[in-house]
Image: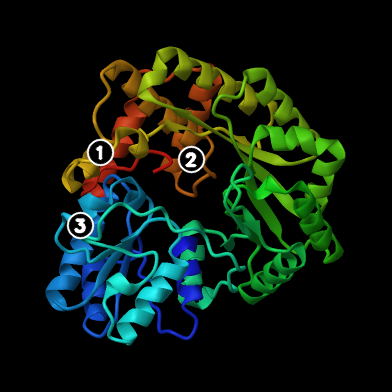
Amino acid sequence: MPLGLLALGSWLEGRHVVIVDGRFELAPEARVVELARSALLLGVSVRTGEPLREALGVSQAARAASPRLPVVWGGPHVLVDPESCFASGVVDGCVPGAGEEPLQAAVAALRSERPLASAPGLRVEGGGEAMAPAAPPTRLWPRADYSLLDVERYFEERGARRLDYCSSRGRRDAPDWLGLRPERVVGEVLELGERYRASELCFQDEDFFADPGRVEAIAGGLIDAGAPLGWRAEGWPGDVLEAGPAGLRRLADSGCLGLQLLVAGVARERLLETAARLRGAGLGGRFVFEVGEADGPGELAAAVSAARALCAMDSRFLTPIRQRRPSAAETGPGRSLEAWATFDSTPWRDAGTERRLARVAFYFAEAQRPPGRRLGKHLLRVLSLLRVRLGFFALDLERVAVELAALVRTGRTRPAPGD
């Protein structure tokens, strides 16, 4: 769920806000054009890479339909290279950093018929030197208004009544980390679960375990309420080890179904110890492995070996292996928008390792996908499980067949696992 857009929309309390999720719209540009004719402002969240083309197309369509409509871009790419956004010719303002207060100021300026440049935290073209990223609001954010989303559509796409929720922002090593009080978190989670008849909730916090005492209090509140729904969160192997067996069992008692763990740079022995702790507490685990071009074939082989060992420990452990995209922040500004749209899709110099990574990612994803009802999907899963068990990923005829079928059926290439 687009929790970032949900937070922005909820912050503009009392305004008429419409969130358009382009993933669900057959013609997102047409939908935006329809809204643009009577809109005060169009805000677009942009990510570096292919999403830039979609953001540009939507912005151009809105500008053509309503030439005086202000267009403001925010999101990760604005932090990387705002000048490339202005060079598109359709962007009036950029919000580097947290967008709640700058967007609220922009709306207030437009309603008062003042220029966008008067809105604090908003950068306009020709506005001089680059400004520091806008800091997160110092006051706790308002309750998320989930009526801004078509929640049932997300449930339908997921095949489960699984709701996303965010209870904190920032990371533990940042001075501006901010978390909601445990009492508020428990109250909102219980109310949302009942209202939307959710069976599961995912904490989408950037650093859910930043404050262990807060996590303990949230777990205690859910236990007192009878642990009415399952929940998941993301953390690091160190969080699992520091919680200890008693702490992990308490998480399980509160309804925790499992944790997603980022394993970059974590030694194999530490991973296996983490997995053993989770298994002992009856918790599942999703261990995310990422391999980049600079890592080479040795790192890929190590990731495959560790993933197979984790799979053998417990069938509830998921071990997706995916390609690590290059960091846009490391490349520096100065590219055109088109160059930014393709910067992360350049073929590796070691084509053999890239092909092996694609095969490995495909078979691990299919092996750990829920069983399908159709015979073909069931057979593909069985074959993938066998390949993972044997560690044999060559002669990938099944993958080629699946990707060709997707191309024929949809006219698009099948996205890589994790995209």
The residue mark sitting in front, 2 or 1, is 1
Q: Residue at x 54, y 45 (%)?
A: 370
Left of 389 or right of it: where is 91?
Answer: left
**Whole-percent x, y for residue 404 in the image:** 25, 38
**Whole-percent x, y for residue 31 in the image:** 26, 74
Q: Please determine whether, in this image, residue 198 is positioned above or below residue 41.
A: above
Disc 3 and disc 1: Cα gap in Å? Answer: 39 Å
- At label 1, which amino acid type do we have? Leu
Left of 261 or right of it: where is 330?
Answer: left
**Whole-percent x, y for residue 155 in the image:** 51, 64
Q: Nearer the viewer, residue 39 or 160?
A: 39
Q: Which residue is mark 1?
A: 404
First in sequence, mark 3 or 1: give its number: 3
Quarter where residue 306 is shown: top right
Contact (CB < 8 A) between labels 3 and 2? no
In the image, farthest residue toward the top = 298
Disc 2 and disc 1: Cα gap in Å? Answer: 18 Å
Q: Secondary structure at mark 3?
A: helix
Quarter where residue 392 is shown: top left
First in sequence, mark 3 or 2: give its number: 3
Q: Please determine whether, in this image, residue 338 is positioned above or below residue 218.
A: above
Contact (CB < 8 A) between labels 2 and 1? no
Q: Which residue is mark 2?
A: 378
